[in-house]
Amino acid sequence: MKLLFLGPQASGKGTQAEIVSKELGIPHISTGNLLRNAEGEIKEEIDSYINRGKLYPDEKMIEILKIRIDKKDCDYGFILDGFPRNINQANALDRITKIDKVIEIHISDEEAVKRLSNRVTCSKCGAIFNLISNPPKVEGVCDKCQGELKKRDDDEEGAIRERLEIYHRDTEPILDHYDSVKIDGEQSIKKVTEDVLKVLR
Ligand code: AMP
């Protein structure tokens, strides 16, 4: 099954993609993580976009994604998280493959800002915690791999506002491009997972 999880920043799509990926045995592909984990010369260029909350140029992003979904582990499907971000990327994706289901995890801007300001991510395994709603057992330490928890550079006010603006302007319109199913992302993590799995079964 080839799935898209769409939604504003901090809607929980990364968390849900991780859970559902294990449930269905298909990889979770976050384009944000692909970019953050890039190595070599390209890293500095990528960081200059990410840290300002700007989108990495479409053509280069599409190329990176294509290489990833051509890998063997995607033979039986994947969950895309953070792609497509605009209609140009959606059209490019249509040319590469056929998506089976699109899920929108919806939260308000107010909730997004609240969550992003309290979000910490494991620098080793990428696990996401929220200092208020889903805190780690030990402050600053990942529950899963004991890696160091850090605030993302783009989770600061200016970049947060920029990213939400881009989401409303460029990403939201692509929900109409697909026959997407909307899920309330302001429920508990467990309830959102239940709703997502209900849609997929
Ligand atoms: P995310 O982890 O999805 O919040 O993405 C973090 C940052 O990575 C974004 O603000 C962009 O700078 C970049 N990024 C992630 N996905 C894409 C994409 N599909 N196209 C362009 N830039 C992206």
Image (spheres, rainbow, N blue to C red):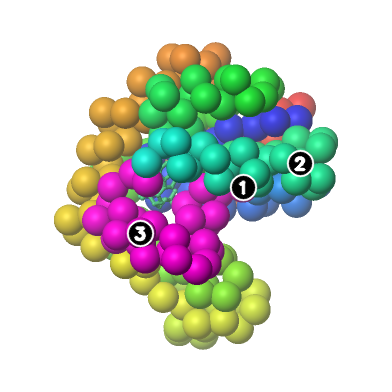
Q: Position of residue 160 (x, y in %)?
A: 25, 52
Looking at marks 1 and 3 on the same chain, the residue that comes earlier in the sequence is marked by 1
Q: Secondary structure at mark 1?
A: strand
Which is more foreground, mark 2 or mark 3? 3
Mark 1: amino acid: Ile
| Residue 60 drawn at (x, y percent) | 46, 42
User: In this figure, which residue is indicated by the disc labeled 1?
Assistant: 29
Q: Where in the figure is residue 61, as x and y percent of width and height? A: 47, 42
**Left or right: 117 with respect to 86?**
left
Q: Answer with mark 2 or mark 1, whichever residue precedes in sequence.
A: 1
Q: Quick check: marks 2 and 1 in contact, CB under 8 Å?
A: yes
Q: Nearer the viewer, residue 15 or 83?
A: 83
Residue 154 vs residue 130, the one in the foreground: 154
Image quadrant in which you'd find residue 117:
bottom left
Q: Measuring from the top left, give residue 48's x and y in whole percent.
A: 30, 59
Q: Residues within 10 Å of mark 1 (few under 14, many from 20)?
A: many
- Classify 10 Å Cα crowding around label 2: few (below 14), some (14-19), many (20 and above): some
- Residue at the image point whose x is 19% and y is 58% from the top: 157
- In the rendered view, tell whether residue 86 sits above or below residue 25: above
Q: Which range is magenta?
A: 29-56
Q: Which residue is mark 2?
A: 74
- Between the C-alphas of marks 2 and 3, the distance is 28 Å
Residue lying at the far left in this picture: please name it.
158
Report, in whole angstroms, how far the alpha carbon at label 1 lies from the one at label 3. Answer: 21 Å
| Amino acid type for the residue under numbered disc 3 | Glu
Q: Is residue 181 visible?
A: no
Tell me the quadrant of the picture where the N terminus can be found.
top right
Q: In the image, what residue occupies the spot 27% across and 37% down?
A: 166
Position of residue 64 in the picture relative to residue 106 (left or right):
right
Residue carrying label 3: 45
The kind of residue tagged 2 is Cys
